[in-house]
Amino acid sequence: MIKAIRGMRDILPPETNRWQWVEAAAREVFELYGYREVRLPLIERTELFARSIGAETDIVAKEMYTFPDRHGDSLTLRPEATASVLRAVLEHGLDKGAGVKKYYTLGPMFRYERPQKGRYRQFYQINCEAYGVDAPELDAEVILLLLDILNRLQLGELRLLVNSLGCRDCQAHFKAALKNFLADKDGLCEDCRRRREANPLRVFDCKSPHCQAILADAPVLKDYLDEACAAHFARVLELLARHGVAYTEQPRLVRGLDYYTRTAFEVVAAGLGAQDAVAGGGRYNGLSRELGGPELPAIGFAIGEDRLLEVLPAALGQGQEFKVFLAALGEAARDRAFSLLQELRGQGLAAEMDFEGRSLKAQMSLADRLGAAYVVILGDRELETGVANLRPMRDFAYIQGEGVRLTEVAGGRMAVQQEEVPLDKLPEVLAQRLLGR
Ligand code: AMP
């Protein structure tokens, strides 16, 4: 049998209910903040990522799915969305005009990383990107938006880490100082020795305890921020504090990609182990120029959906379906049930029946397995009298404004009673019982 590729996985029901629920919540919050969706190709020219993410990053150096197409052009499965969204924004002139230009997108990313818990080769992100404004208010707003999404999902213990990477000038000063500091340090790992030359900021991403120990005394970016960058960062923090956001300043947070400037942030969750970042983002004012576009301030974040789902409380987003099962006995009853099924669905009720002529007992157990709230038994007698029995399979209660919620049956006793209903009134009565209308 052919199996899925290593590091890639199938996301199946009922888990998909939870994914849909998360995405619906994110969309709702995005709309509140004035963001609109873009849907972009999964494949771009390799050059787009090489130029934006940076040739010295792990992503570009060893993690991209890159291949020549049939004409020999080098193409890459997108490893992240920021470069693609900016490409589209510039290509379609969406950066023009006053105010903040706000876009979001959802979808899969691809990185050839070593698979482990919380790390996949195809993984999903919820991305937010905002353009055109450098004001710290936007940074604070973007972080508040991210937290709004995460809070709606009732995630447990989350920590917001923030840092400022300064502008390109601050970074140049800092890199020089860091290079200096690293120059005579023996025992750095091979990766860090390479980074020391090519892109010293990235040594902070190293997971080796030995390198981390060496870095304990390294200079920190905060001390190299110029006045404007320091004031910008202070204002972001002030706005966060004013809105009751608990944050931790993390002077060594540099994020994996080259293009970040000024505000950088990450949200980490307890209970995720080594791969504990649920979301990350920051400002990337220089990227537009890097891609041949105009000067364009920009900021965004990516939520790692796979990881978010791992910390989402188990009870959330299961999707409650209040199915009606039509148990039909005999050909005539099955024929009537088939039409009834469509009428019920027309009323917005999830309904099922059996097409294989099973026994009543088998149909009842199928109804139970499908989680039916009601079974309606249809046989010759019901067709004759035109009246059927509504049989509640589970106890349920009306919650004002929410339709119906199933609750466990205490001691097997049903609070909701069986009732007789004329067949032609069934859709109406069931809609009333199950949808509260
Ligand atoms: P990045 O684009 O690297 O800043 O990642 C943003 C978020 O995407 C991270 O915080 C993770 O939650 C998630 N993420 C990144 N890489 C992976 C991966 N290989 N597997 C699953 N989630 C990932």
Image (cartoon, grey):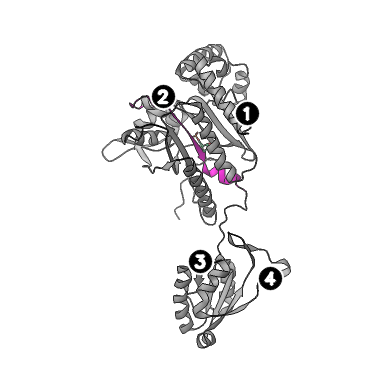
Marks 3 and 4 close (CB-CB < 8 Å): no
Q: Secondary structure at mark 2?
A: loop
* Mark 4 neighbour class, 10 Å CA radius: few under 14, some 14 to 19, many 20 or more: few
Tell me the amino acid under the disc marked 3: Ala
Tell me the amino acid under the disc marked 1: Thr
**Residue at image x 48%, y 82%?**
333
Q: Which mark is residue 350?
A: 3
Earlier-in-chain disc, 1 versus 4: 1
Q: Which mark is residue 286?
A: 2
Q: Quadrant of the N terminus?
A: bottom left
Q: Is residue 385 above or below residue 26?
A: below
Q: Is residue 206 visible?
A: no
Residue highlighted by disc 4 = 415
Left or right of 402? Residue 301 is left
Q: Quadrant of the C terminus?
A: bottom right
Tell us which disc is closer to us: 3 or 4: 4
**Residue at image x 44%, y 76%?**
339
Q: Is residue 180 above or below residue 334?
A: above
Magenta segment range?
291-314
CB of residue at label 2: within 8 Å of ligand 1?
A: no
CA separation in Å, label 1 and label 3: 47 Å
